[in-house]
Image (cartoon, rainbow, N blue to C red):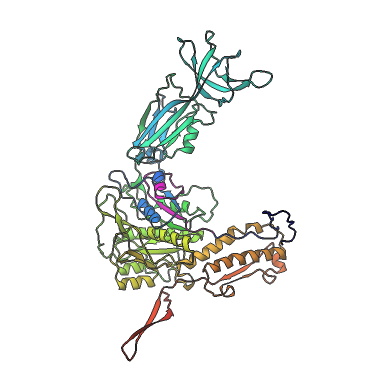
Amino acid sequence: MTAGLQLGRPGIYRHAMRPDEPAALDAVRLDETGFVGVALRGPVHTPVLVTSWSGYVRSFGGFERPRGAPNRLLPYAVQAFFAQGGERAWILRVAPPNAPHSSADDATAQFRVGSVDDGGPALAAANEGTWGNGLQIRLGYEVLQSFVSTLDDDGGIRLPAGAALAPWTLVRLRPLAPTAPPLLNWVTGERRTDPRMSGRSAVFESPPNEPAAKSFGVDVVTAVIEVSEAGAAPGSAERLTGLGLRPGHPRFLPKVLDIESTLLRSAGDWTQQSLTPEPLLADARIKRVQDGADRSPEIGYNSFFDDGPADQDPLDEEHHRGVDAMGRESRIGLLCVPDLTWRSFHSPSEPEPLPAPESQDRSNCCDSCSSFLPEAVEPIYAPSGDAAPGLDARSPADLAEILARQRRLVEVAELRHRFVALLDVPEGMSRRQILDWRACFQTSYAAAYYPWLGVPRADGTRTSLVQVPPSSFAAGITADRERRLGLSWGPANAVAAGAVLAAETVTDATHDELHLRGINVYRQERDGFRLSAARTLSTEPEYIQLSVRRLMTMLALTLESQSQWLVFEPNTAQLRDSLQRMVTEFLRVQHRLGAFAGKTEAESFFVRCDDGLNAPQSLGLGRLVAEIGVAPASPLEYLVLRISQDVDGALQASETGQESLRG
């Protein structure tokens, strides 16, 4: 029996946890993936969570694109992620930084409501792009409730039991006299009408002046907005009802629109003018006064990154762009930038600046990471011929820019110490160039994938393939594998669902060389293209395996985020014992899940928080020191079999164990 718990009749008794019992640690989730790229529509430079492909389409559009615009890879990447089993994706749409000649407002479709002059009530597409030109909007009025009542002595309408009119509700008064026309009026509030406080009347902004009519039919009038996209899938239209037309109404139209709609937002001044309808409640006139524009040709380096190096302060309130904005999302564990090679088309007089890479240790790097010798390597299938193709790695200048963007991406990952950046080996390079490219990265916070994989084009324009960044498939494979089996299972040996062709042929010799350099390769097999490895771009033996990097990140984040309760607690031996028990129990659970290499707990991990680590002088400074050591399990990569032949000619195969070649 638990001490201190008095048991009486049979049943369930709540046992309060003692204050000195630490709460159990819960492993931080790392399968949520960030995607940064070019979308048809959606919020700009703001991470948005989607949990399905249909959710992505609702918020960011599908594969359709403006005429003559380049092919966006973001929707194909997100679709590949969910096809592999990924569940949660954070999407960030990039756009060009605002400039005097190009801004988001100039590129957003605008609509004028009624016949009000400029500056009055207006509507706008929720965000920039030509997609807003296809919006079909109806602003109408409807009667949600009606009742019959009479005027009181002060010119108000008596309210029947159960009726409630919010302030600044619009009502239509229909005199019961057959020849009197209906009237519109605004309710400003309610008042009590008898000493017993049971009667109530609605107070009007302008009391009715109808001495011949004492009885009225009262219609409560609200606005309704219906908006849909031309050619959109059924069920994607929006309908917002019960809207008020004056400030002070609890569902004032512009406020509700800005909160609940993903297609429209308010514009202009809705506070000084009201859209009072005619008594017959005819729909308001809606006219498009500005077309939306596609600014994707202006997207370049400064759309994906902030100016200058990655910001060290995660709590600053400055506006951030692209990868730097996504890097501040505390829930992502993987990051993909499928449109990182997007080409910017600026006028010659306004070239886009390409920032010089930050100085780094290049002891293992090629002589010049940004000036590889171009060697023409034709892919298996030619590019689709889309307008405004991306940066071409076969051009030295383009390859230098690709490398600068990828190094900046890795810089953000190393700064945050939370997620792994998934890189794509640029298309069209020879094996020698790929190895030179690989030598420019030395980090466990990035992984590289090769080759690009072809999927059928989904926008209906022609029957051809689109080359999709291989990291997109790897992100879904990693998220699915870790969620189902745990971080200790390396995210490899899985077929890329949806891929039908590889951009380049991978021979055994090429595969051998790339694998030993830490590049994860998709190999064609009978059932598809199989991801054959899960390595990082580190040469440190401890962090070659992606699963080890991810496990250590999870442990660090879990302990950091869920040990905050220790702050300002009395630094006593009891507190240190509680911390040690809490961490030990957490690591014990991970050991049972196969996260560690040892057979026993003693061989797998240790937790120390004793007086030797917490000397009196350290305690005097308000410090609590714990030392935690783990032996992560590493995935089996090589199974070596010894085949022998006896004197009778029979063959025998025996397993000799694992050989781990650290490239």
Q: Is residue 337 visible?
A: no
Residue 245 pos. (x, y %) = 49, 27
> Would you say residue 295 sits in the magenta stretch?
no
In the displayed structure, 209 sits above or below 256; it is above
Residue 411 pos. (x, y %) = 46, 60
Q: Which residues are magenta?
A: 28-56
Residue 527 pos. (x, y %) = 31, 64
The residue furthest bottom is: 647
Residue 80 pos. (x, y %) = 37, 55
Q: Is residue 477 visible?
A: yes
Depth check, front residue: 462 or 182: 182
Which of the 4 quarters of the picture holds residue 77? Answer: bottom left
Depth check, front residue: 72 or 623: 72
Which of the 4 quarters of the picture holds residue 561? Answer: bottom right
Depth check, front residue: 320 or 156: 156
Going 67% across and 22% down the picture, which residue do you hit? 197
In the displayed structure, 296 sits above or below 573; it is above
Going 54% across and 72% down the picture, which residue do you hit? 631
Which of the 4 quarters of the picture holds residue 12? Answer: bottom right
In the displayed structure, 177 sits above or below 264; it is above
> Would you say residue 33 sits in the magenta stretch?
yes
Query: Does residue 79 appear to the left or right of 198 in the view shown?
Result: left
Locate the C terminus by quadrant: bottom left
Q: How many marks?
A: 0
Locate the N terminus by quadrant: bottom right
The residue furthest top is: 212
Query: Does residue 451 appear to the left or right of 18 in the view shown?
Result: left
